[in-house]
Image: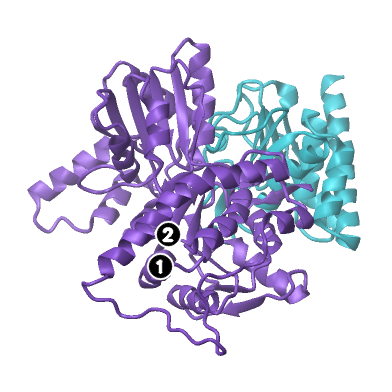
Chain colours: A cyan, B purple
Amino acid sequence: MFQVRIHGRGGQGVVTGAEMLALAAFLEGRYSQAFPSFGSERMGAPVVAFCRISDQEIRLREPVTMPDALLIQDPTLLHQVDLFSGLSKSGFILINSGKSPDELGLSGLPYPEDHLLAFPATEIALKHIGRPLPNSSLLGGFCALTGEIGIDSLKEAIGRRFSGKTAKDNMAAAEASFTIVGESMHAATD
Amino acid sequence: MLQQIEGSRAIACGIALCRPEVVCAYPITPQTHIVEALSEMVRTGELENCEYINVESEFAALSVAIGASSAGARSYTATASQGLLYMAEAVYNAGGLGLPIVMTIGNRAIGAPINIWNDHSDSMALRDAGWIQLYAETNQEALDLHIQAFKLAEALSCPVMVCVDGFILTHAYEQIEIPEAGKVDAFLPPFDPVQVLDCMDPVSIGAMVGPEAFMEVRYLQHYKQLRALEMIPEIAKEFSEQFGRDSGGLARPYRIADAETVVVALGSVNGTVKDVVDEMREEGHLIGSLCVVSFRPFPLMEVRACLENSRRVVVLEKSFSVGLGGPLSDGVRKSLSGIALRGYTVIAGLGGRAITKKSLKGIFAKAEMDELELLNFLDLDHEIVARQIMRERETRRSGPIAENLLKSIGTVASRIA
């Protein structure tokens, strides 16, 4: 089972992100479960959503306390919330920021170097969608970083969730992020 | 069709397939997306021949359902938490009148303190109102139980509550099979009421009954529930034949054949319990579990048959009878009359406290060593409780309890679970 935790702020689409990831996994014929951290969410408050992906039926109903991947939609949460809590030692971290992990004060984290990546998801969203909604970008980056979900499945999920121009723009943001994250991974390993 | 869909929306699809003629709801917290989705379906015409009535309170919601059902319409509503308590009088009325209304409870805690999260306090508060109560383990079962609920309710002329864990199931987005309309139509015939308000053939429903017959009316409610004990498995079997999957029934055992310890629970926590049972089995523990689906009527004989060969029973409860223990434990105890085995109650998950595999494993291991008390509280923070008790001892005006405990804990916004 692969478990993902998405951290963001109310209004950024954390729950939608987790649901699109689950939908993409479903489209690949796998079992998946997305659910919000239950609370009275408010615009701007720290929020969390979870996604589990598995080849077997998922019976577990506890929150994701030991994730395999973290998606961080808002880097200002880095020093406010215990984001890395329970993250597996081989876990993946994807942060929405134009700064490098070093610049974000994240050097020295006990995770493999090529599993920790920051990229400007909001800027990519602004370019393709015209609004600062980093969801599709982060999910595209997730596909490249973890290989857990195929980019085509993600794009199909986006197409089912949205329609018309919104769908097309979000797919473009996901695709562009997939490429950018893929390239920076190669650059890191070269 | 297999869909990736939110639990609430899947339940709404299931309700729509049952072709309700009246849906009434009060659309303010505590409520789920179920009635929101149904209102959309009525507006777009996807759900035909259905009147959606937006009422002014939960009390009105069920009162309208009572009126609609009396007039011969298949009627549905949904609520939770304080909403259910607010309609309590009407809940007893629907039960006493024997009207086959189906109502979803998106189970949540009851204040004070104010809390919007999941536990079973709401439906448990109305367990004795003469309604059948079915608890869903999964979202698939939640959808399926509603289809079975209408069939059961209308066959017996008795209202049915389908209890679905709030948030944990209602807000989970996962894969759920939405049945074909034709199959549901074949399974669930049109509503043929046993009592109906008809201008051409007038009767009155809801007469005053004095001591001469009140007990008999109550006994007949009980008689219906005894008949439900026979009908619930029959309907589940018929459902399985029609839809090709098992849902519902009275109670479902899991790996109990040689189990020395059996965990009994209601609702969605059974999924996590099964995962723990599998892990502990791999380590050589003789443990199994029993998911009770029908809480009213309570299947005493089936529960007894599943537990009588074990050494101990751990009842995991998401509801707390303050001053005694848990309502599920009471039923389990009764089912074991005359059998000497150890029984423990574990109160867990109140007000949305996460029930984790780790904590369950710990408490089941303690149960196996018979190191539990009769009544236990999973992951209770003994330290802040002790501090509050001390505060109350030392100072007469020690302040409001909930606020004091929150101060003891400090900020929680930065925590994950």
Chain letter of the residue beneath label 1 in the structure image = B
Mark 2 vs mark 1, CA separation in Å:
8 Å
Q: Is residue B85 above or below residue B8?
A: below
Asked if the residues shown at circle 2 and circle 1 are in contact, with their CB atoms under 8 angstroms apart, the answer is yes
Q: Would you say B12 lies left or right of B200 here? A: right
| Frontmost residue, B316 versus A10 | B316
Q: How many marks?
A: 2
Residue at screen point 80% across, 46% down:
A137
Q: Earlier in the sequence, mark 2 or mark 1?
A: 1
Q: Is residue B109 visible?
A: no
Q: Is residue B375 visible?
A: yes
Q: Is residue B304 above or below residue B323?
A: above
Residue type at mark 1 is Val
| Frontmost residue, B292 versus B54 | B292
Q: Quadrant of the C terminus of chain A?
A: top right
Residue situated furthest top in the rendering = B284
Callout 1 secondary element: helix
Share a chain, discs 2 and 1? yes
Q: Would you say B382 lies left or right of B230 here? A: left
Q: Which mark is residue B131?
A: 2
Residue B340, by quadrant, is top left
Q: Position of residue B31 (x, y in %)?
A: 52, 64
Which residue lies under the disc numbered 1? B91
Q: Is residue B200 above or below residue B291?
A: below
Residue at screen point 40% across, 25% down:
B262
Q: Position of residue B143 (x, y in %)?
A: 63, 51
Q: Would you say B150 lies left or right of B189 here? A: left
Q: Quadrant of the N terminus of chain A?
A: top right
Residue type at mark 2 is Trp
Q: Is residue A142 above or below residue B162?
A: above
| Frontmost residue, B218 versus B363 | B218
